[in-house]
């Protein structure tokens, strides 16, 4: 039987990332994340927000490259909206005060994408971008024509896309 542990969410950071370096040279960024589900209250008929709060960790290691560094480089902070993709990990411990076993899930982030609009003004801030899995440097970015999100251009950066050849499409 196959197994799959993959989570994809869009939400906002609930606290500024905290960074920690390891003696081995690795690094981790930890932050809180919230995603809101909407549901209709059966008694009142009104729509209600149902927030879910998740602790997240992003590492600089393995195939994910320098993800924790990218969190810092792009200035993620409380309130930043991002798409995250990762896997659940179960933490278990003994509560020191009650002596009971405790547990909670946390999300180990493999990839992320900033969804906040591109900063306006003098352009001194870094442009949001999708993180790249193997550490191969940032990919060129372009603003999408609508929606204020960003996407990764895997082709050469020869300017904005054109409509050349679109006259051959029968619709």
Image: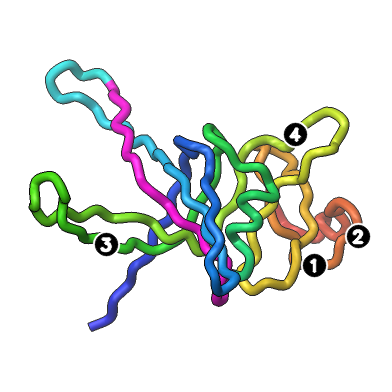
Answer few, some or many: residues within 10 Å of disc 2's Cα (few below 14, many 20 plus, some between 14 and 19). Answer: few
Say the numbered circle drawn on residue 119.
4
Say few, some or many: other residues with alpha carbon within 10 Å of mark 1 (under 14 / 14 to 19 / 20 or more).
few
Label 1 secondary element: loop
Q: Residues within 10 Å of mark 4 (few under 14, many from 20)?
A: few
Residue under pointer 3: 90
Q: Earlier in the sequence, mark 3 or mark 4?
A: 3
At x 24% / y 53%, what residue is drawn?
104
Against 51, is 28 above or below? below
Q: Say left or right for 167 vs 19.
A: right
Depth order, front residue of 56/128: 56
Residue at 16 percent of width and 57 percent of height: 94
Give left or right: position of 20 versus 124.
left
Please report contact status of discs 2 and 1: CB closer than 8 Å, yes or no.
yes
Say which of 167 and 123 sits in front.
Answer: 123
What whole-number distance in Å separates the C-alpha atoms at marks 3 and 4?
A: 36 Å
What residue is disc 2 on? 158
Q: Which mark is residue 155?
A: 1
Q: Give the Cα distance between marks 2 and 1.
A: 9 Å
Residues in magenta, as a range: 47-64
Residue at 64% x, 49% y is 72
Q: Position of residue 139 (x, y in %)?
A: 76, 62
The answer to if 137 sits in the magenta stretch is no
């Amino acid at each position: 039987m196959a197994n799959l542990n993959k989570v994809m969410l869009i939400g906002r950071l609930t606290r500024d990332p905290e960074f920690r370096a390891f003696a081995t040279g690795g690094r981790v960024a930890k932050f809180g994340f919230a995603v809101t589900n909407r549901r209709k209250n059966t008694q009142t008929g009104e729509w209600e927000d149902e927030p879910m709060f998740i602790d997240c960790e992003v590492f600089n290691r393995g195939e994910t490259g320098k993800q924790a560094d990218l969190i810092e480089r792009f200035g993620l902070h409380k309130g930043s909206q991002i798409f995250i993709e990762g896997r659940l990990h179960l933490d278990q411990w003994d509560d020191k005060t009650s002596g009971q076993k405790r547990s909670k899930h946390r999300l180990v982030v493999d990839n992320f994408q900033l969804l906040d609009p591109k900063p306006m003004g003098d352009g001194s801030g870094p442009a949001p971008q999708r993180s790249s899995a193997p550490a191969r440097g940032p990919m060129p970015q372009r603003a999408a024509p609508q929606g204020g999100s960003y996407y990764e251009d895997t082709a050469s950066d020869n300017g904005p896309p054109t409509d050349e050849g679109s006259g051959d499409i029968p619709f």
